[in-house]
Image (cartoon, grey):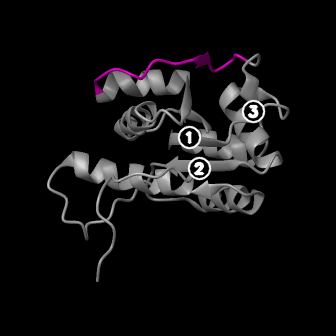
Amino acid sequence: MRILVAITGASGLEYARRLIAVLKGMKEVETSVVVSSGAKEVAKAEGGSLPKADYGESDFSCPFASGSNPPDAMVVIPCSLKSLGEISNGVGNSLINRAAEVCLKERKTLVLVVRETPYSLITIKNMEAVTLAGAVVLPASPGFYGRPESVDDLVDFIVARVLDQIAVPHGIGRRWKA
């Protein structure tokens, strides 16, 4: 399975770090990473380093920029509202937006992990547009029924939901039990 992970300029880089670490630890998954310039700015504010990028945000020679070679799944994590708006309106001005468009047109899994609150009506309409086009909007809203004991537990809750959406088996976190 080939998965493209895109990191954009929203707060929540720890979600991307954890997802990439989990995926890179799986031998049956080939993981590629692209990082936006906005993500680099957010990384300065949040501290820590960004995962190594395999492709630059303007590298349209990347295989995933073509419908003839799409990834099996793409995750934009965290997904900025700027990226959400561009993807929902078909603005292909970066590799991230173009690869997302490729996933939509080729009916591949596209997961957008939006990390923002509250939502404006424009954001809700952009979420509606990408959902109708076939994407999954997965807000970074962790649950508490698993009784998290650390921030890492909250991050794992979201990463587990992402892995579920891209059909990657995992044992991260607790599942609901009534």
Q: Is residue 29 left or right of residue 144?
A: right
- Residue 57 falls within the magenta-colored stretch: yes
| Type of amino acid at the residue the image marks with label 3 | Arg
User: What is the secondary structure assignment of the residue under circle 2?
Assistant: strand
Q: Residues within 10 Å of mark 1 (few under 14, many from 20)?
A: many
Look at the magenta stretch and give its main secondary structure.
loop
Q: CA distance from mark 1 to mark 3?
A: 12 Å
State if disc 1 and disc 2 touch (CB < 8 Å): yes
Q: Residue at x 61, y 16 (%)?
A: 56
Q: Is residue 44 left or right of residue 116?
A: left
Q: Residue at x 56, y 30 (%)?
A: 30
- Indicate which disc, 2 or 1, sits on the residue closer to the N terminus: 1
**What residue occupies the far left of the structure in this picture?**
149
Q: Position of residue 135 (x, y in %)?
A: 67, 55
| Type of amino acid at the residue the image marks with label 2 | Val
Q: In this picture, is 86 found above or below 136?
A: above
Q: CA distance from mark 2 to mark 3?
A: 14 Å
Q: In this picture, is 31 found above or below 79?
A: above
* Residue range (magenta): 47-59
| Type of amino acid at the residue the image marks with label 1 | Val
Q: Residues within 10 Å of mark 3 (few under 14, many from 20)?
A: many
The residue identified by callout 3 is: 98
Mark carried by residue 111: 2
Q: Is residue 44 left or right of residue 108?
A: left
The residue identified by callout 1 is: 76
Q: Is residue 42 visible?
A: yes
